[in-house]
Amino acid sequence: RYTILPTLTLDGFAACDIMRCSCSKERFCSFLPFMKPYPGKNSVLVMDNAKIHHDEVLINVIK
Protein backbone atom coordinates (compact mmCIF):
# COMPACT_ATOMS: atom_id res chain seq x y z
CA ARG A 1 0.00 0.00 0.00
CA TYR A 2 1.35 3.39 -1.00
CA THR A 3 0.21 6.91 -0.19
CA ILE A 4 1.03 9.82 -2.47
CA LEU A 5 0.88 13.48 -1.43
CA PRO A 6 1.33 15.54 -4.60
CA THR A 7 1.15 19.25 -5.28
CA LEU A 8 0.10 19.70 -8.88
CA THR A 9 0.00 22.76 -11.10
CA LEU A 10 -0.91 23.19 -14.74
CA ASP A 11 2.83 22.92 -15.41
CA GLY A 12 3.26 19.59 -13.55
CA PHE A 13 4.33 18.48 -10.09
CA ALA A 14 5.56 21.14 -7.68
CA ALA A 15 6.29 18.63 -4.88
CA CYS A 16 5.50 15.01 -4.14
CA ASP A 17 5.83 12.73 -1.11
CA ILE A 18 5.39 8.98 -1.65
CA MET A 19 5.25 6.69 1.36
CA ARG A 20 4.79 2.96 1.82
CA CYS A 21 2.16 3.32 4.51
CA SER A 22 -0.87 5.36 5.44
CA CYS A 23 -0.17 9.03 5.99
CA SER A 24 -0.17 10.21 9.58
CA LYS A 25 -1.43 13.60 10.69
CA GLU A 26 2.13 14.63 11.56
CA ARG A 27 3.46 13.72 8.12
CA PHE A 28 0.57 15.49 6.39
CA CYS A 29 1.21 18.62 8.49
CA SER A 30 4.91 18.51 7.59
CA PHE A 31 3.92 18.50 3.89
CA LEU A 32 1.63 21.54 4.15
CA PRO A 33 4.45 24.12 3.78
CA PHE A 34 4.78 22.92 0.16
CA MET A 35 1.24 24.20 -0.48
CA LYS A 36 0.66 27.78 -1.57
CA PRO A 37 -1.32 30.03 0.81
CA TYR A 38 -4.86 30.98 -0.19
CA PRO A 39 -5.83 33.07 -2.19
CA GLY A 40 -2.54 32.91 -4.11
CA LYS A 41 -1.83 31.18 -7.39
CA ASN A 42 -2.00 27.34 -7.19
CA SER A 43 -3.57 27.50 -3.72
CA VAL A 44 -6.43 24.97 -4.01
CA LEU A 45 -6.26 22.12 -1.49
CA VAL A 46 -8.23 18.97 -2.38
CA MET A 47 -8.65 16.25 0.25
CA ASP A 48 -10.54 12.99 0.21
CA ASN A 49 -12.51 11.47 3.08
CA ALA A 50 -9.45 10.09 4.91
CA LYS A 51 -9.83 9.91 8.68
CA ILE A 52 -6.99 12.37 9.35
CA HIS A 53 -8.71 15.01 7.21
CA HIS A 54 -11.45 15.26 9.87
CA ASP A 55 -9.02 15.96 12.72
CA GLU A 56 -9.75 19.31 14.44
CA VAL A 57 -6.06 20.15 14.92
CA LEU A 58 -5.34 19.51 11.24
CA ILE A 59 -8.36 21.54 10.15
CA ASN A 60 -7.14 24.49 12.26
CA VAL A 61 -3.62 24.21 10.81
CA ILE A 62 -5.04 24.37 7.28
CA LYS A 63 -7.30 27.35 8.06
Image (cartoon, rainbow, N blue to C red):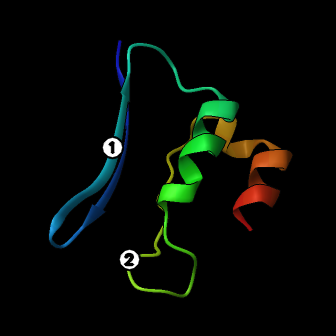
Q: Which residue is mark 1?
A: 16
Q: Position of residue 13 (x, y in %)?
A: 23, 56
> Label 1: how many residues lie within 10 Å, few (<14), some (14-19) or many (20+)?
few
Q: Of 43 and 34, which appears nearest the observer?
A: 34
Whether tag 1 and tag 2 are in contact, CB under 8 A, the answer is no
Measured in 3D between alpha carbons, the distance from the residue under mark 1 to the one under mark 2, in whole angstroms, is 15 Å
* On screen, residue 6 above or below 40: above
* Residue occupying the point 49% across, 63% down: 35
Q: Earlier in the sequence, mark 1 or mark 2?
A: 1
* Residue occupying the point 63% across, 26% down: 24
Q: Residue furthest left?
A: 11
* Residue occupying the point 33% across, 43% down: 16
Res 8 quadrant in image: bottom left
Q: Of 6 and 48, which appears nearest the observer?
A: 6
* Residue occupying the point 75% across, 48% down: 58
Res 4 quadrant in image: top left
Q: Position of residue 17 (x, y in %)?
A: 38, 36
> Label 2: how many residues lie within 10 Å, few (<14), some (14-19) or many (20+)?
some
Q: Which residue is mark 2?
A: 42
Classify residue 12 as left or right of residue 30: left
Which kind of residue does numbered mark 1 sit on?
Cys
Q: Secondary structure at mark 1?
A: strand
Which kind of residue does numbered mark 2 sit on?
Asn
Classify residue 24 as left or right of residue 59: left
